[in-house]
Amino acid sequence: MSLNIKKLLIVAVIAAVILAYLLFDLDQYLRLDFLQQQLAAIHRFYAQNTLSSWLIFMAVYIAVTALSIPGAAIMTLAAGAIFGLTVGVVLVSFASAIGATLAFLV
């Protein structure tokens, strides 16, 4: 694949993700009131699927950060509420660093 096709593919994927974010109103899931309403369900899922919860959270945080989608501050607060201070800080630190690196590369 030539370099131009790779660049176009990257731009198309980023545009598709942003378009999906806007079309499906995914912003509603990155609001503090939504997280407060769902906190009990999130804690139940976390108790049953610890590693999966960490990986899902990091993947979403990386995507939000890499694509500069509003909501990283709420996700940072959510990490502390869901995972606790220590685990939350570690997850957010790694995810934000990876997301920022990807945003720079894009």
Image (spheres, helix red, strand yellow):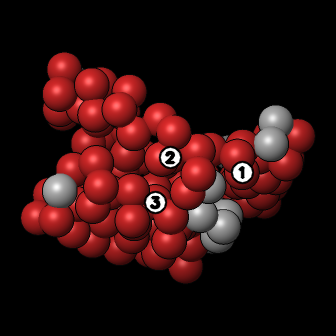
Q: Please state which amino acid type lies under the numbered disc 1.
A: Asp
Mark 3: which secondary structure?
helix
Q: Which residue is pictured at 19% across the width and 20% down the height?
A: 48
Q: Which residue is pictured at 82% across the width and 36% down the height?
A: 24
Does residue 13 appear anywhere in the picture? no
Above or below, comparing residue 60 to residue 37 in the picture: below
Give how far across and how far down residue 68 sits, in percent. 64, 70
Is there CB contact under 8 Å for labels 1 and 2?
no
Q: Which residue is pictured at 16% across the width and 65% down the height?
A: 85
Residue 27, labelled with which disc? Answer: 1
Give how far across and how far down residue 44 sits, in percent. 27, 25
Rate crowding at label 2 as few (under 14), some (14 to 19) or many (20 or more) other CA atoms within 10 Å: many
Query: Nearer the N terminus, badge 1 or badge 2?
Result: 1
The residue that label 2 is drawn on is 35
Closer-to-camera residue (12/19): 19
Dot in front, 1 or 2: 2
Give how far across and how far down residue 71 sits, in percent. 59, 64
Q: How far, Cα to Cα, is label 1 from label 3?
A: 12 Å
Closer-to-camera residue (89/14): 89
- Say left or right for 4 vs 36: right
The residue that label 3 is drawn on is 75
